Image: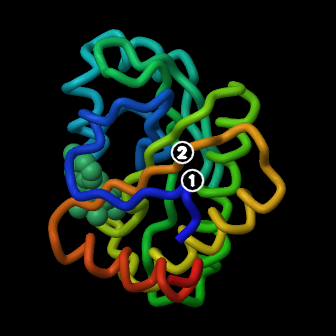
Amino acid sequence: MNPRVQIVEGDITKQQVDAIVNAANTSLLGGGGVDGAIHRAAGPELLEETRKIGGCPTGEARVSKGYRLPAKYVIHTVGPVWAGGHKNEDNLLANCYRNSFKAAKDLKIKSVAFPSISTGAYGFPLGRATEIALRETKKFLETDKTLTKVVFVCFGEKALNIYKDIAKKVFGE
Ligand code: ADP
C-alpha cells in the first residue's frame, strides 16, 4: 500500500483532515446521503456559501469552508448518475477525483478525505467506482508532493472490504 493512502470505515464528517470531499449534486444546495450529513454537521453557513457559488457541473469541483466540521474546507464534486456505463460515467467519475485533487493542491493542504462518490443514490457500481477512485489517486500521488494523507472513508464494512481488496490490486500489497 502507498503509505500516504488510508482506508477507514466511518463517517466522513468526523474526519480530522484539512478538507473533506462532498458527493454533491449540480445545484450544490444539499441533498441526501453524504451531502445531507455534511450540511448537517457543518451548519447552515455552508448552504449560505454554496448557494452563492451557484452550482457545479458533473465532474467538476468547487471549494467552500468547512464551518463546524473538523475539516477546514469542503471540496464539493458532482459525480455522474449511473446510466448503465455507456454515458461517459467512468470518465466523469475520474474527473471528480482529478478535479478534487487539483482543488486540494490549489489550497496547498496536506490531507483530504473522500467518500465513495456516485455509489449511493447515483447508483454507480461500487467495485467499478472504487477502481477508478484508487487509480486516479495513484496517478495523482505519483507526481504530487503536497498531499501527505488521502483517506477513503467507507460507509459500512462491505465498502471497506471492497476498497481494501481493490487497493491491493492497484497499489500492491
Ligand atoms: P451519490 O449521490 O454521489 O451516489 P450518496 O451520498 O447517495 O451520493 O452516496 C455516496 C456514498 O457515500 C455511498 O457509498 C454512501 O454509502 C456513502 N455515505 C453516506 N453517508 C456517509 C457518511 N456520513 N460518511 C461517509 N460516507 C457516507
Q: Looking at the image, which residue is at 54% across and 37% down? A: 111
> What amino acid type is highlighted by mark number 2?
Lys
Q: Nearer the viewer, residue 156 or 57?
A: 156
Q: Splitting the image into 4 quarters, where does residue 70 fall?
A: top left
- Quarter of the rendered image showing ligand 1: bottom left
Q: Where residue 92 appears, x then y in whole percent?
A: 63, 67
Q: x, y percentage for residue 62?
A: 60, 33
- Judge from the rendering whether residue 9 lies leftward or rightward of residue 166; answer left or right: left
Query: What residue type is disc 1 on?
Result: Arg
Circle 1 sits on which residue?
4
Q: Relative to the observer, which residue lies in front, 162 or 125?
A: 162
Query: Badge 2, how many Cα within 10 Å: few under 14, some, many 20+?
Result: some
- In what element is the residue under mark 2? strand
Asked whether mark 1 lies closer than 8 Å to ligand 1, one says no
Q: Which mark is residue 149?
A: 2
Answer left or right for 90 relative to 36: right
Is 81 located above or below residue 17 in the figure? below
Residue 32 visible to the viewer: no
Q: Are marks 1 and 2 in contact (CB under 8 Å)?
A: yes
Find residue 67 and report its image quarter: top left
| Real-space Cα separation, disc 1 to disc 2, in angstroms | 5 Å
Mark 1 nearby-residue class (10 Å; few <14, some 14–19, many ≥20)? few
Q: Position of residue 145 (x, y in %)?
A: 78, 43
Looking at the rendered structure, which numbered label has been put on residue 89?
A: none
